[in-house]
Amino acid sequence: MQLPDKMVEYLETVRQQIRWKKAQAPVLEEIRNHLSDQKDALIKDGIDEETAICKAIEEMSDPVVVGEQLDRTHRPRPDWPLLAMTAILLLFGLSIQFMIGLDIHNGMEMFYKQVIWSGLAIIVLLVAYFVDFTIMGKYSWIIYLLLIAMTIGGSWFYGRGYARLTAIPLLLFPTIFAGMVYRIRNRGYGGLILCGATAIIPALLSLFTHNWTVLALICLSCLTILTYALAKGWFNVRKLYSLLILYLSSAIVLSMMFFTLISQPYARQRLQVVFNPSLEPTSSGYIGTVIQRFLSNSRLIGEGLPVNGYGQYPLSHLLPGANSDFILTYLTYKFGWIIFIGIILIFMAFITRSVLMGTRQRSLLGQLVSLAIILTFAIQWFTFIVSNSGFLLFGPLTLH
Amino acid sequence: MDKSLLSGSTTMLILKLLEETDMYGYEMIEELGKRSKNVFELKAGTLYPLLHTLEQNNMLISYEKVTEKARIRKYYSITKRGRKHLHEKAEEWGVYTAAVNNVLGGVDFATA
């Protein structure tokens, strides 16, 4: 029997919320039958077919909510290969750090710390993997406020010198932002403005704690998430108008931030050194100069040529963070550009796979959350690669 | 799995219906509405996630049956575990309502 369009549309929306493909068909069959039963019963009561269809759908309640509840009931089985792959990469990273750590003053101490942090990270990862991700939508406001409290508390407690630690909660903002956009997706222009307001607060916090990397990350990912949501027709607003509002207001806010920053002498000086580290080769441009000089002496395969002007010291002693923030520079000089290229390729493969998995997400919340996570990860990676090439505008604050 | 679905009184009502005879979803909503004189208007959007959760917890099992109109219907049947859960819930409910009645106005109020 040919189903009426409205029912097909309803069923399709429900289907899109159920992420576990195997569960979809039988569940939809059941719901389709229910709708047909309801419709037939209403027609029997003397209602015309068109109204009966509408009433049947109405009595079923919101397809997104129904689909989400069914999605929660039908949890997919864990993707063990993916988890195993993550574990292998983590162990690989740790063993490289161990090897370099042997070579560095207090390197072993840092290695042990890293082992402890990795242990914690695995616990967090497993919790995040197995926990029902729809809480991102449900409790996004509470998590948002908690993150803000943690950032403010952290920077008050540690002071500005520990920008790294205060950056950790800020990194989660784009993901939570996705949850919030999802929550207020039906609220029209008011909702859109609310979204903008919620994005500005963490952006300002990262500005005040001098986390330029995080600032860029938050602005870029929140803007992308909102663009995506608007392009999908959320918020029930006119696409062109709302995109115009979004980009105009972002441009104003960002340029205000930029001019405040640039008006401070220290920031201007920092910018100059970023573009040309050799202006200050022994002070603020030191790291940039070391990286650029050693990289220019690196070969495609094998250890790089000796660099003049630094005495007999090996790179691991000259470059702070050779086993962490600038590990890629170190490996490139030690083993050749082949490592640099290889790591970029692995990263590209990883991102491509994530994007593919993300586009296969039919659940709306799932799509947006995976977009946010991919963006966070990609921007972190990008800043890591760029700073390991000696361009230090965005410190590699947060990777590892 | 959503634990909150299991705790509600809706679970008890559904299990009670199925204790008497096997039913499919639409039938349950109709029957519940009829018996409660339309006080309980269960939404299908609530019913199916609940049924699926109960099935995953082995309180129900389902089977398919083809109707006269060649429609495939999914019937639900209560299991031993489901019956046990129902009796526990019913007992709890009894204690609860008795307590509420005691507060509101004694036994007379409850039987009036």
Image (spheres, rainbow, N blue to C red):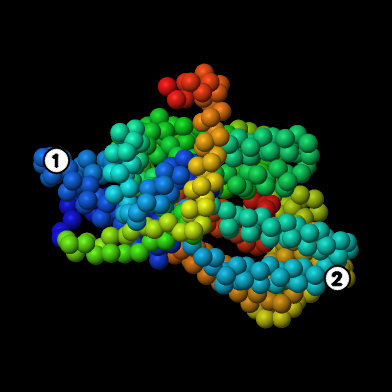
Asked if residue A310 shows in the view, the reply is no
Look at 11% across and 40% down and name the residue there.
Answer: A46
User: Which residue, as the protein is rendered here, is positioned at the far bottom?
Assistant: A301
Asked if residue A94 shows in the view, the reply is yes
Please state the total of marks drawn on the protein image: 2
Q: Position of residue A199 (x, y in %)?
A: 53, 37
Look at 63% across and 33% down and name the residue there.
Answer: A263
Q: Is residue A312 above or below residue A142?
A: below
Crowd rating for badge 2 (residues with CA inside 10 Å; few <14, some 14–19, many 20+): few
First along the sequence among labels 1 and 2: 1
Residue type at mark 2: give it.
Answer: Leu
The circle drawn on residue A45 is 1
Quadrant for the N terminus of chain A, please: bottom left
Reading the image, the residue beneath label 2 is A102
Q: Position of residue A382 (x, y in %)?
A: 58, 58
Q: Is residue A126 left or right of residue A156?
A: left
Q: Is residue A161 above or below residue A282?
A: above
Look at 62% across and 62% down and name the residue there.
Answer: A385
Secondary structure at badge 1 equals loop
Crowd rating for badge 1 (residues with CA inside 10 Å; few <14, some 14–19, many 20+): few
Residue type at mark 1: give it.
Answer: Asp
Secondary structure at badge 2 equals loop
| Nearest-to-viewer mark from 1 and 2 | 1
Q: Quadrant of residue A16?
A: bottom left
Look at 60% across and 67% down and name the residue there.
Answer: A83
Q: Position of residue A62 (x, y in %)?
A: 34, 43
User: Which residue, as the protein is rendered here, is positioned at the far top?
Assistant: B105
Q: Chain of mark 1?
A: A
Q: Chain of mark 2?
A: A
Frontmost residue, A220 versus A270: A220
